[in-house]
Amino acid sequence: MEIKVMANILEVNDKFAAQVNARLAEHGIFALNLMGAPGCGKTLLLEKTIAALKSELNIAIIEGDLYTDKDAQRIEQPGVQVVQINTVGGCHLDANMVNIALDHLELTGLDLLIIENVGNLVCPAEFNIGEQACVTVLSITEGEDKPRKYPLIFFKAQAIVINKTDLLPFTDFNLESAINDLTAINSAAELITVSCRTGDGLNQWYDWLRKRAKKQARC
């Protein structure tokens, strides 16, 4: 009986995800589902991305969090639309939440929608929210064993950002081992090593976003 209930939940979610995807496609919007553990640097990556690309792309953010709007306040800037979703303890966003959030955004003319999911390495990977791509952030401070312990969230990603590389000299994180594990789990994903604090590697991330946003606009 429990398996049947779970199947129904996923089936309903997939229907809403299809609606979200269709609405985004209608407007030529590239949307990505940004996932990762709490503290991996997702919000700082968003801040850097908005600052670097808002002059060339019309960007909006859907900010998922358990209770607060602290991250939404951090990234809210003139010219960038931000919608906050509080899950009130829920460990992930679902497609219906995103569908409702789209009602609060001006979609016409939008190029790029980034949906920052709730910080968690498990549940966000299990729910399609209508995105065109998933991106998973792994930080040096989490340890290189996380890809092997939580493979699904890395398997689903089209790009994997390894953040906080400026801290490598101060930890025992084995970058080569982490990259080998990530490649074994998902050889198709683009691996991007960055330090959001120093800016190292971020140009590769910006280029990855630009190419996909322009490709989606042509579809």
Image (cartoon, helix red, strand yellow):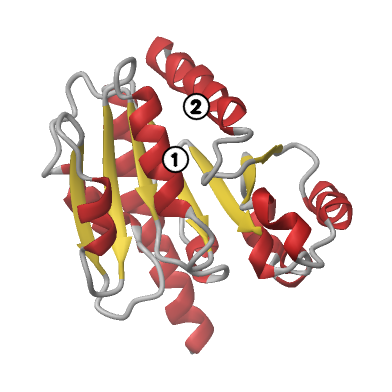
Amino acid on which the number 1 mark rests in the picture: Leu
Please indicate, yes or no, whether residue 96 appears anywhere in the rendered image: no
> Which residue is depicted at the point 31% across and 31% down?
24
The answer to whether 136 appears left or right of 24 in the picture is: right
Q: How far is disc 1 from disc 2 in space, using C-alphas?
A: 9 Å
- Residue 162 place in picture, x, y as percent: 66, 49
Residue 19: quadrant of the picture: top left
Judged from the image, the secondary structure of the residue bearing numbered disc 2 is helix
- Crowdedness of circle 2 by 10 Å Cα count: few (<14), some, many (20+)? many
Amino acid on which the number 2 mark rests in the picture: Leu
- Residue 132 place in picture, x, y as percent: 47, 36
The answer to whether 74 appears left or right of 33 in the picture is: left
- Residue 103 place in picture, x, y as percent: 12, 43
- Crowdedness of circle 1 by 10 Å Cα count: few (<14), some, many (20+)? many
Judged from the image, the secondary structure of the residue bearing numbered disc 1 is strand
> Which residue is depicted at the point 32% across and 33% down?
22
User: Which residue reaches farthest top?
Assistant: 218
Residue 168: quadrant of the picture: bottom right
Q: Nearer the viewer, residue 108 or 4?
A: 108
Q: Would you name the residue on which mark 2 appears?
A: 209
Q: Are marks 1 and 2 in contact (CB under 8 Å)?
A: yes
Count of number-bearing discs? 2
Q: Is residue 133 above or below residue 210?
A: below
- Residue 130 place in picture, x, y as percent: 39, 44
Q: Is residue 86 above or below residue 110?
A: below
> Which residue is depicted at the point 55% across and 36% down?
199
Mark toward the viewer: 1 or 2: 2
* Between discs 1 and 2, the one toward the N terminus: 1
User: Which residue reaches farthest bottom?
Assistant: 1
Q: Nearer the viewer, residue 97 or 70?
A: 70
